[in-house]
Amino acid sequence: MEFRIIALDMDGTLLDAAGQIPDSFWPVLAELRARGVAVAPASGRQLATLQAIFPGDTFIAENGTCVFHEGEIVSTTFLDAATVRAVIDVAGDADMDLVVCTPTVAYHRPGISPETEKELEKYYHSRQATEDLHAVTDVIKLAVFTTDNAEQTVYPVLLDAAPGASVVVSGAHWVDIMHAEAGKGRALRELAEAMGVEKRETAAFGDYLNDLELLEEAGTAWAMENAHPDIKAIADHIAPPNTEEGVVTVLRGLLD
């Protein structure tokens, strides 16, 4: 095994069609850890959510704006107050379902739609409703959910609202806004530096546009067969689709 860190996107990558970690993954994870490999979920999901579904001590959460390793948050990247204020105002005017994320809690307005509530239950285990999103401090990410095509609808609006930030389509129905220098790629680099790991010793798997920098930063990159075309274009290898346990298949091959 030539890798010391393997970063795994979750939705559309490790998770199966039902949004679950395949049972076949757990013995592979145990073998990787026995060989000294740090396996880190690298997700747009909240740290608390990742900790609830993935046993471990290394996490790249909130699209890289929050990195957790060996019992503590080792890196956070905060958004500037002006960007946060502008996005909150635009989201309110356009009646968007906005989530304001801190390292430990996600905030949203009361009265969100049932569709949004279902999504928040999946991605944000630590959340709180508030009438005043402007009062939230230490913001690392803003996330907007839409039942429409996010890339075609809310993305252009948010791009205009936050010209100095990183605005990323993180899923078919989600757009994330972060500091311009934030991202999964930077998070992987900082994690590797903290662990004394060289780039060639890192690997990453991903499927969507918020995984682009992660795959570019990794020493070896796998895109899922079901990945966005832009992700497949920059990957070193193509893994079978998430619906066929593609990550597990590749990792087994690496172990062998």
Image (cartoon, rainbow, N blue to C red):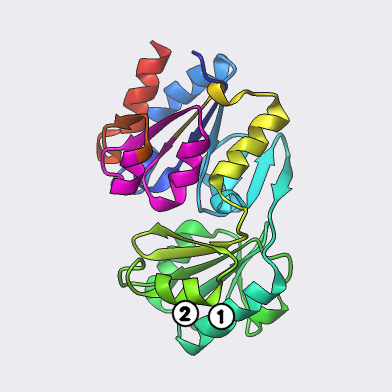
Residues drawn in magenta: 205-233
User: x%, y% of residue 57?
Assistant: 64, 35
User: x%, y% of residue 74?
Assistant: 73, 43
Amino acid at circle 1: Arg
Residue 109 shows which numbered tag? 1
Instruction: Give the position of the C terminus as an image quadrant.
Output: top left
Q: Residues within 10 Å of mark 1 (few under 14, many from 20)?
A: some
| Residue that appears at 38% across and 49% down | 208
User: x%, y% of residue 89?
Assistant: 57, 84
Of residue 63 and residue 168, the one placed in the foreground of this image is: 168
Please tell me whether residue 223 belongs to the stretch shown in magenta.
Answer: yes
Locate residue 150: give its quadrant: bottom left
- Vertically, is 165 above or below 230? below
User: x%, y% of residue 186?
Assistant: 60, 43
Residue 251 shows which numbered tag? none
- Vertically, is 91 above or below 169? below
Amino acid at circle 2: Ile
Query: Dot 2 lies on which element?
Result: loop
| Residue that appears at 64% across and 74% down | 84
Query: What residue did someone put label 2 on?
Result: 112
